[in-house]
Amino acid sequence: MDKTIKKHIDEHVDVLKSLSDHTATIGQIAKILIHCLSDKGTIFWCGNGGSASDSQHLSGELIGRFVDNRKSLRSIALSSGDAVGTCIANDFGFVNIFSRQLEGLARPGDVLIGITTSGNSQNILNAFKAANSLKVKTIGFLGKGGGKALKYADVSIVIKSKTTARIQEMHILIGHILCDLIEEGLNLK
């Protein structure tokens, strides 16, 4: 047991150290998000499985609060509505559950953050394509080399790991850093 525990902790620490390579990109993303929210835009989030949960979590941090009580910010997790998701999946296929929502909700100047540990989830790729056609900025939280999503995201952070759990741990950390930077950048602290 101890060996397995130590292996996970050591791997987490190694991947965490490599995250400092992304400082400039995290800052760039924060500026994009602050600009979007300053212009009354919306941040959309999407992901599958654990990444869907991260999308909902991070969207909630913006709508509710991250650290201090402050005004609510425009943020929507596209994985939140079971009725909408199943309706779209039934009528248009699971690969279109996020792109279809963007077509109805997004406006130029909004931002889409797609979270995919593989970078190859077709519904995320389709969401990026739809966002690009709608003049919505696209940001990828990726892993495992970035996959096909690198081609469609305006800005990406690719976690240097092939382990899904480590990638997800870094994605949520990046999301929390961005929430802090947003509150700071909008002078909400």
Image: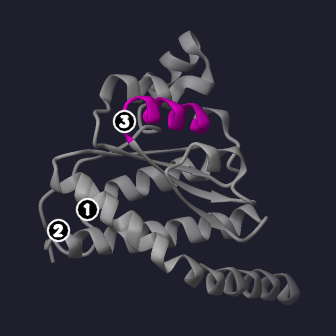
Instruction: Say which label, 2 or 1, has the lower sequence index.
Output: 1
Local packing at callout 2 (Cα closer than 10 Å; few below 14, some 14-19, many 20+) is: few
**Mark 2 touching mark 1, by CB under 8 A?**
yes
Local packing at callout 1 (Cα closer than 10 Å; few below 14, some 14-19, many 20+) is: many
Q: Residue at x 63, y 87 (%)?
A: 17
In depth, the one of 160 and 7 nearer the eye is: 160
In depth, the one of 74 and 36 nearer the eye is: 36
Which amino acid type corresponds to the residue marked 2 in the rendered image? Leu
The local secondary structure at tag 2 comes to: loop
In this picture, is 164 found above or below 42? Answer: below
Local packing at callout 3 (Cα closer than 10 Å; few below 14, some 14-19, many 20+) is: some
x%, y% of residue 98? 49, 31
**Mark 1 touching mark 3, by CB under 8 A?**
no
**Residue 126: quarter of image:** top right
> Is residue 34 in the magenta section?
no
Q: Residue at x 56, y 13 (%)?
A: 92
Q: Which residues are magenta?
A: 124-136
**Residue 60: quarter of image:** bottom left
Residue 135, disc = 3
Q: Main secondary structure of the magenta part?
A: helix
x%, y% of residue 51? 57, 52
The local secondary structure at tag 3 comes to: loop
Q: Badge 1 is on which residue?
A: 34
Instruction: Say which label, 1 or 3, has the lower sequence index.
Output: 1
Which amino acid type corresponds to the residue marked 3 in the rendered image? Lys
- Quadrant for the C terminus, please: bottom left
> Is residue 131 in the magenta section?
yes
The local secondary structure at tag 1 comes to: helix
Q: Badge 2 is on which residue?
A: 186
